[in-house]
Image: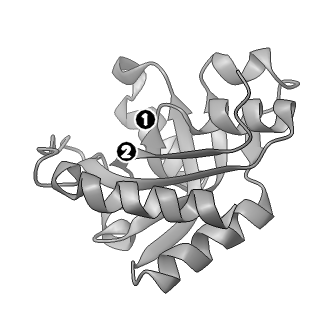
Amino acid sequence: MGAKKFVLFGSCGVLDDDSVKDKLIIPISAIRDEGTSYHYIAPSPEIEADPHSVKILESVLSDCGYPFIKGKTWTSDAIYRETLPLIQERKQEGCIAVEMECASMLAVAKYRHIPFIQFLYGADDLSSEVWDIRDLASYGLTNAEKYMVLAFECGLAL
């Protein structure tokens, strides 16, 4: 449809609450446990983020004074398949969050040869045996305006 670059932000489930707490998440790669990405690039278990885009995002977040953590995410489009054994497996693979779009967007961006940046804020906590269903009003939605400004800054920096 003519887009020249993508910037995406949104909430995610946290798999490592201690290291993610009060920080924005910069995905550096994503486990491909969804269906969309396979329509755009060859099958593989994981997809890497573009290092240049990651550096731009790091710079914007630092310049704007936001703490962040970089890490691997798990993209799943089957929320009822986020079982305790699978969560433990993903944590052992190094995932710090679960979300529903990163792998797909990374694949589309690679296929279309356009830059893509994504940052996430932690919402639900899946890091323990009990699912902590957090209210988005307390864990990010109230900051939506702030995140939109960050997204515009990222778009300008791309």
Please provide percent x and percent y for residue 77: 48, 21
Is 141 situated left or right of 32 in this image? left
Name the residue tied to disc 2.
Answer: 12
Q: Nearer the viewer, residue 130 or 73?
A: 73
**What is the quadrant of the N terminus in the image?**
top right
Q: Is residue 119 above or below residue 104?
A: below
Query: Secondary structure beneath disc 2?
Result: strand
- Toward which corner of the image does residue 2 lie, by quadrant? top right
| Amino acid carrying mark 1 in the image | Pro
Name the residue tied to disc 1.
Answer: 85
At x 65%, y 34%, the residue is 105
Please provide percent x and percent y for residue 27: 58, 55
At x 74%, y 30%, the residue is 108
Please provide percent x and percent y for residue 16: 38, 60
Q: Is residue 129 visible?
A: yes
Is 12 situated left or right of 141 in this image? right
Please provide percent x and percent y for residue 87: 43, 40
**What is the quadrant of the C terminus in the image?**
bottom right
Query: Crowding at label 2, few (<14), some or many (≥20) Cα neighbours within 10 Å?
Result: many
| Amino acid carrying mark 2 in the image | Cys
